[in-house]
Structures are given as C-alpha cells and as structure tokens.
Amino acid sequence: MLDSYKLKSTSSLPFPYSKRLNTIGTSNADLPLVDPGMYQLDITLRRGQNLAARDRGGTSDPYVKFKIGGKEVFRSKIIHKNLNPVWEEKACILIDQPREPLYIKVFDYDFGLQDDFMGSAFLDLTLLELKRPTDVTLTLKDPHYPDHDLGSILLSVILTPKEGEQRDVELSKTEVLGSFFSVKSFWWRSYRPPAFPALGFSRAERQNLCCQNTQFQTQSLRLSDLHRKSHLWRGIVSITLIEGRDLKAMDSNGFSDPYVKFRLGHQKYKSKIMPKTLNPQWREQFDFHLYEERGGIIDITAWDKDAGKRDDFIGRCQIDLSALSREQTHKLELQLEEGEGHLVLLVTLTASATVSISDLSVNSLEDQKEREAILKRYSPMRMFHNVKDVGFLQVKVIRAEGLMAADVTGKSDPFCVVELNNDRLLTHTVYKNLNPEWNKIFTFNIKDIHSVLEVTVYDEDRDRSADFLGKVAIPLLTIQNGEQKAYVLKNKQLTGPTKGVIYLEIDVIFNAVKASIRTLIPKEQKYIEEENRLSKQLLLRNFIRMKRCVMVLVNAAYYINSCFDWDSPPRSLAAFMLFLFVVWNFELYMIPLFLLLLLTWNYFLIKSGKDNRQRDTVVEDMLEDEEEEDDKDDKDSEKKGFINKIYAIQEVCVSVQNILDEVASFGERIKNTFNWTVPFLSWLAIAALCVFTVILYFIPLRYIVLVWGINKFTKKLRSPYAIDNNELLDFLSRVPSDVQVVQYQELKQDPSHSPCKRKKNNLG
C-alpha cells in the first residue's frame, strides 16, 4: 500500500507543512504526503465578528464561501444587514488529501450587481489533530490592503480519516448522483495520477512508488465512488407556493411587487412576480432533490421587485426538513422574519429510486425477468396506476471519438454529463485521451415523454472550471430503441457541429396513455438554467420570427380581401358559394372537424413523399450569427460597470426579448402541430379533435357552456390549493418551436473527416 511510504523527516518540507500552531492543537504533519485514503472534514460555520461594511447604510449582507483546490465546496446562507452574523451552518466535505488548505472568502451580497469582497483567510488542514473538534478564529484580510481590519470568522472543524470505509463502497443502483455543479467540486481530481514529491525519497523509493500506480488508480476509483455516494439524492421535496398574506408595503403606492426565492444547498428556485399586491396568489409547484437522509434547511426570502434599482428585501424564513414526516403533505404558514406577513406553502417529502448508474455488465433490459417487469409496469393495463411514472429510459454511454484537444499537451481529460430535466448523472474521467471509452449505463424514470435527453462532454481541468467539448440534445420521442448510434457533437447553442462524435445506445419504454395525460399538465421547470442576458442578435431573431408568424395572418387577410375584390372571378365565385353553404349549414362541430381534416391532409402528404416542411435555413443562419455574438459578449462582459449603467434599459430589453420569443414560439408550435413535426402530438391532437367533434355534434352548445361555467366557478371550492393551468397551452408547450427543431436536428457525419470512418461498419 502506498501509505506505507512516509517522509523520513518533515524538516525539509515547505513552510506550510513544517509549521505548527499551538492554537490549533497537535499537528498531523506526520501524515503521509502520498495517501490514497480519504478524509472527512466536518465544518461548523459559527459566526462573524466586526465584519466590514460594504453597503451605503453602514451594514452588509454577508455570506461565506469555502474552497479547496480552487473549487467551491460550500456556500453559506446570506445574513442580511448584519456585521456580526450568526450562521451555525454545518458542512461535510470529503477530501483526498489534507495538504490542500481550506480557503474562506466572505462576500457582501448585492442583488443584480457584482458581490463585494469582504475578506479572506485560509486554514492549513495539516495542522489539525485528527478526530478532535477544534475551534478556530480566522482573521480576515484583503491581499490588496493587508493593513485593513476586516473582522474575523469563527469555525469548528473536525478532520477524520475515512480509510476503512472506502474499500467497501459500491454505487447504489437506486440512488441518483447529484447536480453536476456541486458534485464536480468534490471529486474533481479523484482520478488524477499522484504527484510524488522528490523531497525525502531516494531514487529507488520513487521508482517503487511509480510501480504502485495501478493500485493507486484502483483506489482512486473507489474514492470517486465514495464521493459520488456522499452526493446521491435520497428523495424529492415537492413544494407548492400557495400565497402570501399581509406582506410589507415597500413601494410609495402602498403596495409591493413580491416574488420569492428558495434555496436548498446549490438548488435554487425563483417564483414569478405578482405586481401591486400585499396578498399575492402564486399557485406554483416545483421540486428539489434531497441529498441528506436527515433532511436539510430550505432558505426562503421574499423580495419586492424594483425596476432599475436594487430589489427591496421583504423578509425571510426557513423550513427544517428533518422535522417533517415523509410521504405526507404538510401545509405550512411561515412567519417572515425581519419583515411582515406570512407565506403559505405545501411541502411533501417522498422517497425516490428513479435514477441509477452502473457498468455495461449490469443491464436491466438484458435481464429477461427485469425487462418483463419493466414492460409490465408500463403496460396499457396499468394506465391509471401512478400517472406521474410515465416511462423508463436507459442510456448506454459507450465511447467518444475525435474529441477536441483542450489541454496544451494536445489531449483532453473528458467526462460525460447525462441530463434529463433536473436529473444529472456523470461518468468518470478518462485522462489524456481524445477517444475515451466510458461504458456506463444510466437509467431514468420518465415523468414527461416530451423531455429532451442532453448529453454533454467536458474536459476536466485541475485549476479551473471544466471546458466544454460538445453536446447533443435528443428528444425522447425520436429515439430508436436498441440502436447503437454515433451522434455528432454540437456547440453550446446546439446550432452547429463541433469536433468529435459520441456513441450512445438508448432505450425508451413508456405508457402512451400516461404520456397523453401528462401532456396536459404543466411542464417541469428546470431550476438550474443560465440567466437571460441582453443580446442584439437574439432580439433581432425573435423579432423576425414574430414577424413571420404575423405575416401568415396578413397574407391570409390579403387573400380573403382579394376574393372580395374579385381579382380572380372563378376563385371569388367559388369562395362566395362556399361562404353561403358554410354560413347556412354551420354547426360548431365543424371547427374541430376542419382542423382534423387539415391534420389528416398534411399526414397523407408526408406519407406520399410530398413533404411541404422545408428546412428553415433562415433560423439556422440567425442562430449561427447569435453564437458569434455570444463570444463577443463574453469578452465585453469583463468591462465592469457597463451593465450597471444600463441596468434598467437591459431589464426592459430582456423582457421584450423574452415576450417576442414567447409569441413567436406560440405561432410556430401551432404550425408544427399541423405539420406533424412530432407525430405523437399530432396523433394526440387527432384523438382530441375527434372527441370534441363528437361531443359538439351530439351535445347542444348551451349544455357544454353550462358545464364549463359550473366547473370554473366551483373549482376553487372543490380544491382550494389547485394550481391553475390551461390544457391547450400545456399541450402546445410540448410542441417544439422552429428554433428547437433546428437544435434537436441530428447532424450527419462527413465521411471524409469522420474519425470513425473505419469503424462505421462495425456498429451493432
């Protein structure tokens, strides 16, 4: 074992490893510098004392970041308007060696602006005594102004070796690996080969250590599995934000424009803004992943939206999930601290075993008994059993070829991230390889058959965030089961190819009835998304898209007007006779019947080879231009202060930009429904239109309107906390817009440049 090799003397070590502090306790500097074991660092962030004031009111809104090896491993909650904050937050961090110091940085939170630096300090973990709680007071300093007094941070730390546990760790098939953004910071360098210091070793010893490299890599794999297991999620926290009561008036008109922010660890959610009210009705539902079996703390803050300036803080509250029983819905009325009013929530904790990761040797669908059980689970006979469980997805991530070289050595350290809505799974990292083989199987439970599977390849970097290598987006309804396929990697915007291909084999099993029912329910919102930013090209693109949709109506109006003007007598005569016939014999059922005939007509056109759907080169060109502008925007964003000056203008422009996108997408979704862009949805539309036609034919309109009105008037009485939705809009939200059609379009390989040209005949 490698931990049998120790330095003969610590006197030759650099300063941080030879120094001992009496205030910390007995040093563990005699720990082997080459230690394949793992350590658990338990930190309790107690409080801050006499912190620096960064706001105009002489206060700050401090929060703390912990970093190890340049990666953020923990972020505390924000304490508003306090220079002596009390956090009492606990963090459990797994580290592969205690030689990396723990860096502590304190910031002042500024909404919409860059957070202000309040000081930093570091803790040398080699000076901690193992398995002994230690209270530490760290003085904050600013490297640019070392003489300034920035206060201090009080911690309690315990460093515990975990060598005995790493050998027996196996990755559970019934647990999901957590968010990519939080997990990678904990096991970023788990597989990296060891770097042995020359100090204290003879040449023979160094050669002997190098011969143990294979054993070290095996232990690194176990270490990575333990890192993963510590961030597997154990369940789902389902939250419904119902309403606010008697909130504090923050505006001069006696009202507020409230919205609510939720945070559980690195997971965040922001509600919609309710204008000019002190008793807002949100009726919003979302889910968080629960990583800790003992629960966690959900931080909730209420804000008043102010255009062009910093939003006003209304109040805050917390939910201790460990105090709530599972598999039960809890109605909570939470008093806002540091403010006025209440928030009413529904919170449900449910256990979940919906996602797993395994090697190719463990394949659920190849086991005949498991496959039959899965097929039975989603058979038509169980269409009304657990409607939320729509289907089963299995993804085999086999290998990639011809990836981009991201390192100066001409190689990359690629790993793969597989995402389905808010579920994220990761492969291990293959070092120094442009043709990595992962051979991993990922399984997901499908909650919405219209979801898009995203597979992204990154290059792991030791000293900074991962580099993007390529991405593919695959709608579940386009997947051909059991076919190993080479997907050309695309750029970040999914608008064009990048270097490399990835080999995937995907299987989808779902219940069509459940999928149809879920289509009429609001989509799951992703709580980790990039924030919208102002883009001239995006604004122009959305304007052109909306203009094209409007021009369809304008051209139709011109056509009808030409019939009125008798520009073409035969056409006008036919239109006149048709008008008389329809008006004289019109019944309401003819509207869905006409739409039904239109869908059927386009279907037969497509089947007969007369496809009238043309590839939208205009949208593709605009997306490519937008990608080029995004690169320019990344450089321009470094100029601090520019965004602050036009903050109000930017907010308005972003809103207009998003409205244009929504309007254009709405028109395109209607068009794509009748163009059979997604056959499943078009068949569903045919079924719905048939039902509506029969209902309207046999049932008088007055009875239908009466039933509709009674349902609307009594809905709140029957279900006070029901979330309002529109089934038609929910249906259209599943239909891709023209932009999404281009993004989801599979690229064809160029035979002359394909790195897998010689292997394409070997695909199974």
Image: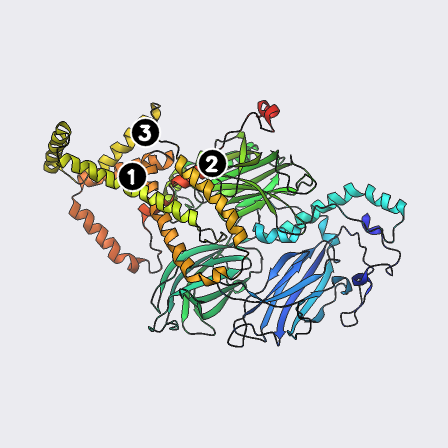
Closest to the observer: 463 or 454? Answer: 463
Q: How far apart are marks 2 and 1 (CA)?
A: 23 Å
The residue beneath circle 1 is 688
Pinpoint residue 716: horizontal percent, then vertical percent: 30, 59
Q: Which amino acid, mark 1?
A: Ala
Q: Distance between the residues labelled 2 and 3?
A: 25 Å
The residue beneath circle 3 is 603
User: Image height check: is 199 above or below 318?
Assistant: above
Pinpoint residue 56: horizontal percent, then vertical percent: 51, 74
Disc 3: CA contacts within 10 A as few (<14), some (14-19) or many (>=20): some
Tell me if label 1 and label 3 are in contact, CB under 8 Å: no
Q: Which amino acid, mark 2?
A: Ile
User: Which label belongs to residue 118?
Assistant: none
Disc 1: CA contacts within 10 A as few (<14), some (14-19) or many (>=20): few
Residue drawn 64% across the image and 39% down it = 405
The residue beneath circle 2 is 509
